[in-house]
Image: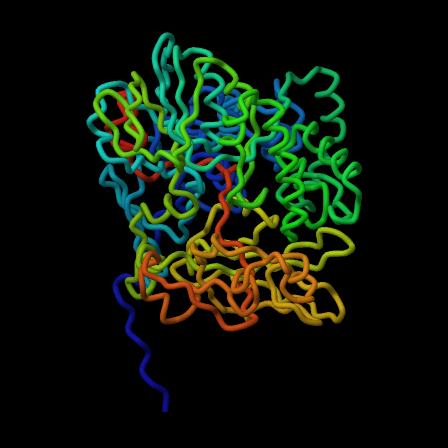
Amino acid sequence: MHSAPRPSSPSATITPQLDAVVVGAGFSGLYQLHRLRELGLRTRVFEACDDIGGTWYRNRYPGARCDVESTAYSFSFSPELDQEWEWSERYATQPELLRYLHHVADRFDLRKDVVLRTRVTRAVYDEDSHIWQVNTDTGETVTTRFVVLATGCMSAVKEPDIPGVDTFAGLALHTADWPHEGVDLTGRRVAVIGTGCSGVQAIPLLAEQAAGLTVFQRTPVYALPALNRPLTAEETAAFKARYPEFRAAQRKSRGGTVFELPTQSALEVDEAERTATYEAGWESGLLSGLLRTYTDILADRAANETVAEFVRSKIRSIVTDPETAETLSPRTFPFGTKRPCLDTDYYATYNKPHVGVVDLTRTPIVEITPSGVRTSEREHAVDVIVFATGFDAMTGSQIAVDIVGKGGTTLREKWAAGPGITWAWSRPASRTSSRSLVPSARRCSATRWCPSNSMWSGSPTASPTCGGTASPRSTPPRAPRGTGAPTSPISPPGPSTRMSPPGTRERMCRASRAYSWPTRAARTGTGRSATQPPGRGTAASPCPAALPEARSRPWSERAVRPLRPGSPLSRSRGRGGTAGSSGGTPLMPTASRFRGRRAADACGR
């Protein structure tokens, strides 16, 4: 006997107005629009800003430029576009990148499907009809089969959480919301709070204008020279001739950068040879110039210390004051575990008599006052404060939208204890290293599987959302099994290296940053190194946050306790920062206290 057919709900017969809604008109959003059109899908892009460009529309601070070479940091879907566009510099500035995006939008007639000055505020999934209802801040509501968040992983502005910030009587600026008309800082006393990539790029140019510049630094960075320069006509012609081969190599590479993989350990060569290799990497002017020198830079603490000390020696050779040089020298984290910065005269700027640095680990900021910045030591009177405090990275722009999936669960609820991770396989770094399990931040339970492209960064990827059911690639492929191969840096030692079963979810652990990462002895399965403190980075004492009882508590209340022995997270390095290469719409409004903005600018208001 057959049961009666289930009656159709009214929503089950709805025909969506669109096939796809894309949020954000930066690099990712424009490409998604182009590709979805090619597939014959009715697509609309919503962009909160006054114009297209994403991160390259908003980030207009002095010195803003890409840290990937222009010829690589560009669309690869059109050979004709490769041939017709000419880059003026090795590393393009923000204005040139924005001109490039405008050219692409006009050439492929993308603007007609982009709605500007419109912020997506809510997206609700209807399980019966398999349709999303998308709401905007203009009151418009559309229905669509797919929602693609091309919001970028570095677009939700990280506002300064400092007491008294609203009381400052001078000019307050944020590097991610710089006035479009620019700011004249000639003769002014300027404070910069933050020394991430934005601060590193802006500080040398701010110092050229300011009468006095005080940099407030919490964590020093590893900054490498960009060696930027104009591209000659001969260089451009030669590169265009081999663009097809370069694009093919990019698609087979890690993270889109093409280079030969190293074959030696940093500890297998003598100091003179190692120093010469590091000098070549330093002089390459590439973000990964030092990371690609040896196979174990990111797998062995002793090997990593050799390159970290090399960078610190460079800082000492550039900065004339020994105390300042030491303040600028990073010592609290291994090289490459946070994204390095590319700079132009960053360290040399501190040799100028009107430039100083305040070490916030020694004298932390107490409050912002009407006249400046007060630390635990004294008050620094300034006319302008530049907040280079970065972004609510990776997830901030996504949870800013009220996304409601299956069962009425919101993305904010799903990620209340921190976003989950999936496990991805990276290709071997050399003949002597095995495949490595790399944790990659899962966008949500509804997004496709996005593997990290290297041990130290995950490339930002637009995330198609499909109502809580994973797309065909949501489950990572099984790892090949073998015997006798060296173990992965973050997988348990043994004769074979296997992934967690499909569907296994672990939680990222912020506290794991405090854990020593595996030494060479741990990586090769020979036990704990004598220099590695007990209970740190060993299989018996991994990151604690994946324990079921820990997941229900806030991160701040989670005690440090071991995972089960052999868990892949037992050797994870925790979350590392990345600088997004995909532009996107900032979804988080910026506080009105930043007075340098344009009053008419609708982006983020």
Quadrant for residue 490, please give it: bottom right
Occupied quadrant, residue 257 = top right
Residue plotted at (44% across, 62% down): 507
Residue 12 position in % (x across, y down): 31, 63
In this view, the residue farthest toward the bottom is 1
How far from the left and from the top, in percent, is residue 525? 68, 66
Q: Is residue 496 above or below residue 224?
A: below
Q: Is residue 507 visible?
A: yes
Residue 169 x/y as whole percent:
21, 20
Q: Residue at x 63, y 69 (%)?
A: 498
Q: Residue at x 28, y 24 (%)?
A: 379
- The image position of residue 435, as x and y in percent, is 68, 59
Q: Nearer the viewer, residue 2 or 52?
A: 52
Left or right position of 588 against 110: left
Is any part of residue 106 visible from this angle?
Answer: no
Q: Which quadrant does the C terminus fall into?
A: top left
Quadrant for the N terminus, please. bottom left
